[in-house]
Image (cartoon, coloured by chain):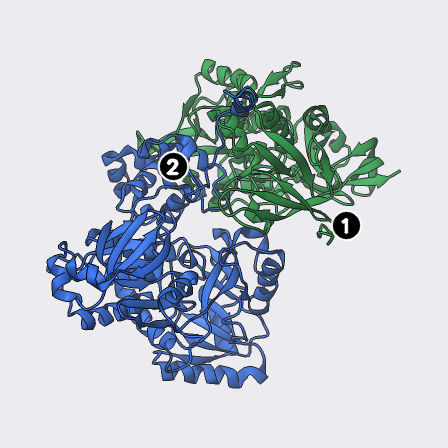
Amino acid sequence: MEKYDVLIIGAGVTGTAVARELSRYQLKIGVLEREEDVCCGTSKANSAIVHAGYDAEPGTLKAKMNVRGNQLIGELAQELDFPFRRNGSLVLCLDEKQYPALQKLYEKGIANGVKELRILSREEVLEMEPNVTDQVVAALYAPTGGIVCPFHMTIAFAENACENGVTFHFNTEVKTIFRKQVADAAESPEQTDIEKMYLPHDTGTWQLVTSSGIFEAKCIINAAGIYADYFHNMVSEKKIHITPRKGEYCLLDKTAGTHVDHTIFALPGKFGKGVLVTPTVHGNLLIGPTATDIENKEGINTTREGLDEVLTKSTASVKNIPTRQVITSFAGLRAHSDGDDFIIEEAVKDFIDCAGIESPGLSSAPAIGEMVAEILRKKYALQEKDNFISTRKGMKDFQKMTLEERNEQIRHNPAYGNIICRCEMVTEGEIMDAIHRPLGARSLDGIKRRTRAGMGRCQAGFCSPRTMEILARELQIPIEEITKSGRNSQIIKGTNKSSFVDTFKEENRI
Amino acid sequence: MKYYDIVIIGGGPAGLAAAVAARKNGAESILILERDKELGGILNQCIHNGFGLHTFQEELTGPEYAARFITQVKELQIEYRLHTMVMDISSDKIVTAMNREEGMFQIQAKAVILAMGCRERSRGALNIPGYRPAGIFSAGTAQRLVNIEGYLPGRKVVILGSGDIGLIMARRMTLEGAEVQVVAELMPYSGGLKRNIVQCLDDFGIPLKLSHTVVDIKGKERVEGITLAEVDEKGKPIPGTEEEYECDTLLLSVGLIPENELSRGMGVDLNPITSGPKVNESLETSLEGVFACGNVLHVHDLVDFVSEEAAAAGRNAADYICHHKTSDEIQDRCLQQNTIQLSTENGIRYTVPSEIRMEYMPEELTVRFRVGGVYKNCYISCYFDGERILHRRRPVVAPGEMEQIKLTREQLAKYPLLEKITLKIEEA
């Protein structure tokens, strides 16, 4: 049984942001993740937007966290070396009658403390974004809005946390949580000094039964995304309910990536922010999401209706979107709480919720990390480490290198001269780095999120056999074990004609 | 900086045939840049037979067909680099490439032949709804796994798209021990060659469902099943016609897209219908001295025609560098010369080439094109301005089979004022 001071459930952007922030302190921290990698749930399938913060109701946690997160993220992107660009966002008003709503949004932004907000005239908008619909009458302009790579942001938090001593347990699904009897805890001779120092003795420690054994923790952080209600309700009498709210998206080729430069929203409707059109930090164009409340917490399938809705609605705000350039579509589930706000608090003693983290959750992650750390710091009088490493170096970005710099890298390691993914121009060296970094990639999707290999216009058609080969070689596992995304997602089903052998064996009971 | 007269981008069937022809027509300094580990391109994974009936009057496998050209390239001592990725080509023909040994390097070429081939359309391009588990492959990726690596991508298979690779893979997967349940095709006709439907589906009892598509993919980790539905004339699924198939694999053979990212980067004009460069009679693109051939120009169904087309591009590139004109001379000629546009109407989607400069018109020119639908008992007609000069009866034409007509210099010379050649289908 492994014992921790703090166990975080979930290695999404919230869990890893909290882990990174807590790793400043003298604590033994673990992260339990059901999937084989970080960033496998809500964090991997969203709008990749850093919202300015005008959208949430003043006074809510969403408003506070969003604005604070937006302030923190610029510096954090530098420190932890992940792609972030403040491209600014525009909320279009497409009808004179809607103008009061735009004005109200502006006022909400001001109340929330969003800087540099202003309302633009039709002419100003069209000059800024010529592809915006001719129907536009005005727009709210938020220069502080930005775009980020959610994979790299989450991976950056996780790698930095890992370097600062946080242990990650993947393929570890938490089944039950209960409190160990007080008497047991008091009699335990194995208490570490830290436990004696910071954590209260008047209560039992938490026991977490998982798919990879039992873990013990003094304090639990519930960052389980759409499953946060499941764990909360396991320990608390005051029940919460999280609804998976599905959002479907289409991603377009880089040839369409400059169609708009700002993130284009239309005025919010009943279901969230409506369909946005935005460039991504990597130069694609992203359109979506829909907002459909569903029952199934695993329902990340796209639907015909959803994708059609995305394509149709996007044309309301931006004209001539080259929809023939769609290279993939995906769906993500937002964790919508019944109270319509983030729940970041101590639910029961030594059990901290980070629940209902839907949009603007990505933007808020740095602030949520900070807030949870503050709760724990007060509670346990935490001491800072003197050897905390605040920076992390991301993967090499060859696109930004000169020919000479690139050749220097290739001389040093010839694998950097061998292109594996021809659409995104990813080299063997980068794929090897993705595998051997702290918390390295174990699957094709893991490689994809770290290097973009397979994320381009051919969608891994050419590179997947070669990436599989590299994974098998570097991890020293048979190629049959290589998966798309862990668990039972193996890519191949044996060697040629192996099914004949299997059938023969079955029939003859060998 | 290195210097070559002709740099050929891609060492597949088009690049190889272009190189051989260029050398035979007097080009001394030629370099082929190939990104894969060997020459031959996609032919290396096409281990079925049926190649070379036109070129060699015998039936070869893909690797055998490629070997014939590779042997010639070696005999003619044409230089080539393997494992070498072209990163960029500038409009003034500086090719930036990279490999392990030389790092990133640049070559100044006098002429460039684009022969990068094509890629397969992915699931994403079709926006097929459903989950995104392992077990969804483009047919070409599956072909590589099976034929080159020796791995079976799945055991119970549904194939969407009846393009040639899909049909070939239905047979291959069956032979390697998978159960291919059905091939579904969105269109009311197959996009593949008739012979492939007979030899790859009919002979193995694999059903072909025309006017059907995939409307759902099930399975979060690995494919567990797919849903097919019939579609109406507009290609929209008809509610109530859904059929469930339990399977672990979905292969997609839903079209090929010429890979013109480099061409676009250097500023070559592209034809939105073929997704390939616009070319003249010399297979020269909108950039002088930049030629294109093979699947990067327009998608072919027979490699024999790729070789033929590429040989023409190679010859023309050799002529270009051997009789290299100054830009003033070219300007003069452009002013004088008579350029004839090729246009299409009624049922014909495009032609390659799309214009003919009379001065460069060879003795005989092959004009290749595709039709947009299935037509029975029709005529393929060619008009010189208003005058019909060809009216060829065809029992059936289909989008899956490339068509061609030949024009001669002599024929065109009779019409000195000719401005437009129009190809169209006329019903009987």
> How many other residues sit within 10 Å of disc 1, few (<14), some (14-19) or many (≥20)?
few
Mark 2–mark 1 distance (CA, rounded to whole Å): 43 Å
Is the residue A402 above or below the residue B4 in the image? below
Q: Nearer the viewer, residue A18 or B84?
A: A18
Picture layout, residue B419 above or below residue B179 = below
User: Who is closer to the viewer here, B400 or A292?
Assistant: A292
- Disc 2 target residue: A419
Q: Is residue A194 left or right of residue A219?
A: left
- Please name the color used to draw chain A: blue
Q: Residue at x 60, y 33 (%)?
A: B282
Tell me what residue is drawn at x 53 percent, y 84 percent.
A99
Chain drawn green in the picture:
B
Most extreme residue toward the front is A183
- Kindly identify the amino acid type of the residue bearing the numbered disc 2: Ile
Query: Which residue is rendered at x = 75% and y = 42% of the image?
Result: B188
Which kind of residue does numbered mark 1 sit on? Glu
Under circle 1, the secondary element is: loop
Q: Give the residue number, with chain letter if any, for mark 1.
A: B233
Instruction: Look at the image and tell me whether residue B98 can be seen.
Output: no
Q: Nearer the viewer, residue A199 or A363?
A: A199
- Foreground label between 2 and 1: 1
Residue B58, position as x, y percentages in the image: 65, 13
Q: Chain of mark 2?
A: A
For mark 2, give the secondary structure: strand
Q: x%, y% of residue B361?
A: 66, 31
Report x, y in % for residue B5: 44, 29
Residue at screen point 39% across, 64% down: A228
Question: Residue A19, labelled with which disc?
Answer: none
Examine the rendered structure and indicate whether residue B298 appears above or below residue A30. above
